[in-house]
């Protein structure tokens, strides 16, 4: 049973606790345990990144209602819609880079895909409605356990081999997206409006990010992706 590290969101004191607390939607974890993996929460401590990856069999970088600081990818003036969680981002960059250095399987989900893109040398669109003409509703109005739009899967990519599909429906909950990819990164999925929906880095054993939330399992493509990631993590 592979041990898979999962990044959590962090929240300030208030609400659930009078002290700072971590948070994560349950299905990020349950989808892994259902696939016969053992998920483990990771404390946001950059100095622990190396020790984590020496013990883990895989890493999931999750999403959240925040953005990567544009200063980290040369994004210029910060858009007024951008909110950051600098401590979380510092840890996720550290643990992702450590995982890649160890050639550990990495899956980036939504904001986690954006973080992965930056770790691989890419850049981000700070606010889709201001950058893409006639953009789809990437922050879909319907519930996240329903589809929001289709994605087109790029042929001859790992994602295409995993899903066996040229297109399928996904959910959508983001206002940012990958703009440019690093030198050794490949785009593997696109929305009909041209927004990048998936990336991968073929030099690694399994390094893949998707802009949607496959942990909701709303399609066979999602099921295939989770299964393939867990299989890649098995020691």
Image: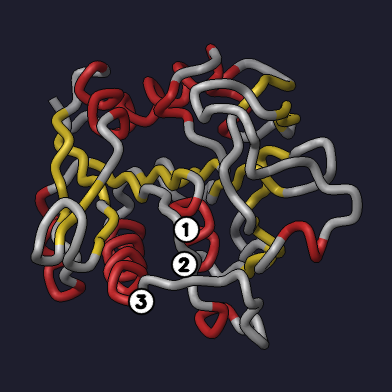
The quadrant holding residue 40 is top left
SS type, badge 3? helix
Q: Nearer the viewer, mark 2 or mark 3?
A: 3
The quadrant holding residue 93 is bottom left
Residue that badge 1 annotates: 116
Query: Is any atom of residue 49 visible in this view?
Result: no
Residue that badge 3 annotates: 86
Q: Position of residue 45 (x, y in %)?
A: 16, 70
Q: Position of residue 26 (x, y in %)?
A: 25, 32
Q: Nearer the viewer, mark 3 or mark 1?
A: 3
Q: Position of residue 100 (x, y in %)?
A: 35, 58
Q: Is residue 203 above or below residue 184?
A: above
The alpha-carbon separation of the residues under discs 2 and 3 comes to: 15 Å
The alpha-carbon separation of the residues under discs 3 and 1 comes to: 15 Å
SS type, badge 2? helix
SS type, badge 1? helix
Q: Are marks 2 and 1 in contact (CB under 8 Å)?
A: yes
Q: Position of residue 79 (x, y in %)?
A: 65, 77
- Quadrant where the C terminus lies? top left
């Amino acid at each position: 049973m592979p041990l898979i590290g999962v990044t959590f969101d962090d929240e300030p004191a208030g609400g659930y606790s009078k002290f700072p607390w971590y948070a994560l939607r349950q299905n990020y974890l349950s989808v892994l345990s259902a696939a016969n993996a053992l998920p483990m929460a990771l404390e946001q401590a950059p100095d622990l990144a190396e020790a984590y990856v020496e013990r883990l069999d895989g890493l999931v970088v999750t999403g959240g209602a925040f953005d990567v600081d544009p200063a980290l990818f040369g994004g210029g003036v910060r858009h007024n819609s951008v909110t950051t969680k600098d401590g979380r981002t510092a840890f996720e960059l550290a643990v992702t880079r450590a995982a890649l250095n160890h050639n550990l399987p990495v899956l980036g989900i939504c904001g986690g895909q954006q973080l992965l893109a930056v770790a691989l040398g890419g850049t981000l669109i700070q606010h889709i409605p201001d950058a893409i003409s006639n953009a789809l509703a990437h922050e879909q109005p319907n519930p996240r356990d329903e589809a929001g739009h289709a994605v087109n899967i790029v042929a001859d990519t790992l994602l295409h081999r995993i899903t066996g599909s040229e297109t399928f429906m996904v959910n959508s909950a983001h206002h940012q997206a990958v703009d440019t990819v690093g030198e050794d990164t490949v785009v593997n999925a696109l929305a009909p409006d041209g927004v990048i929906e998936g990336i991968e880095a073929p030099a690694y054993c399994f390094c893949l990010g998707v802009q949607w939330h496959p942990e909701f399992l709303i399609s066979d493509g999602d099921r295939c992706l989770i299964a393939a990631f867990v299989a890649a993590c098995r020691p």
